[in-house]
Image (cartoon, rainbow, N blue to C red):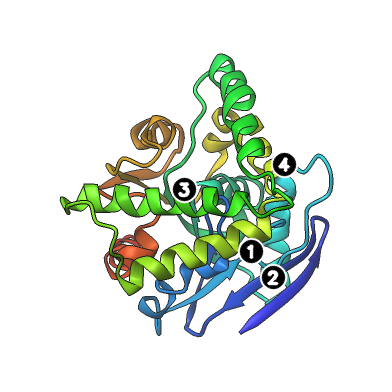
Amino acid sequence: MNHYANTPAGRVHAVAGEGECPLILLHQGLRSAASFHRLMPFLGPRYRGVAVDLPGCGGSEAPPEGVTVVDLAESVVGIMDSLGLERAHVFGNHTGATVAVEVAAGWPERVDRLALFGYALVNSEEERAAELGTRVREMERDLESAPDGSHLPRWWAWLRSQVALKRFADGDVPSDTFSSDEIGFMKMGLIDLARSADTFVPIYRAVFEFDSHARLPRVKAPTLVVDGTGPFEPEIVRRGEAVAALIPDCRTHTMEGEDGNIIWWRPEAFAHVMEEFFETR
């Protein structure tokens, strides 16, 4: 079911499933609620997945200038309010993981349990400056649209590279023949890129400006930090032990050969990891 809520960060879209226990799902950067399409069926009937389009992504409006992670988190709380959800489990993937942490830190009474995949922990001001000066600028350049559409092959090639990394992690040989699942992944990604290209850079900047070392210790909810050993962006997201050390009640789990796209490639396996954590007392 499609759902919309007016929040300080603009009108926000979410897709709400059916089930007993609400589970907020926050996507990685340059994706949308659609990235949870294959995961949500494995959550029910026990869990009610609520996949949120972060502001500037999917069906949500562009965020205001100078948006912060607090603003993004407030938009998630706005969705919860509009759906009448007093409390929920929260899962965040990459960019969504940073937003999920702020939801848990800023509104602890609203979060039962917190699950994170690929949390981008910035360890020093020097690293923060490098990320803002290099990664964010590269993102801004790569997302620029050309009037003749020449940016589209570049975006498609980036999505193909993610498929190639997945094949490499699985030990598969390179090929120019793609399965229907792989084509579906790339089509979904291209649509998400087209919808967020003009609005995502401020969100990405907000993530790297976020003070994780100040906010992670304020998370009161029992937390699971999942690391993947896949080759996609290992330099920034494979820091689960360091993240867990900053959260009072936290455990870690490693999924060999996986990255944030596990929710598309192996949704049943990831749903099992989350369910096991949510049910453990």
How far is mark 3 from mark 1, CA to CA? 22 Å
Task: Classify mark 3: helix, strand or loop.
Answer: helix
Confirm or deny contact between disc 2 and disc 1 (CB under 8 A): yes
Q: Which residue is mark 1?
A: 53
Q: Which residue is mark 3?
A: 158
- Residue at coordinates 46% horizontally, 48% vertically from top-left? 158
- Viewer-side residue, 137 vs 261: 137
Q: Which residue is mark 2?
A: 13
User: Label 3 neighbourhood size at 10 Å, few (<14), some (14-19), many (20+)?
Assistant: some
Confirm or deny contact between disc 1 and disc 4 (CB under 8 A): no
Confirm or deny contact between disc 4 and disc 2 (CB under 8 A): no
- Residue at coordinates 60% horizontally, 76% vertically from top-left? 15
Which comes before the other along the chain, label 2 or label 1? 2
In this rendering, position of residue 23 left or right of residue 99: left
User: Label 1 neighbourhood size at 10 Å, few (<14), some (14-19), many (20+)?
Assistant: many
- Viewer-side residue, 194 vs 213: 194
Task: Name above or below for residue 206 compared with residue 185.
Answer: above
Q: Which residue is mark 4?
A: 202
Q: Amino acid at mark 1?
A: Asp
Which comes before the other along the chain, label 1 or label 4? 1
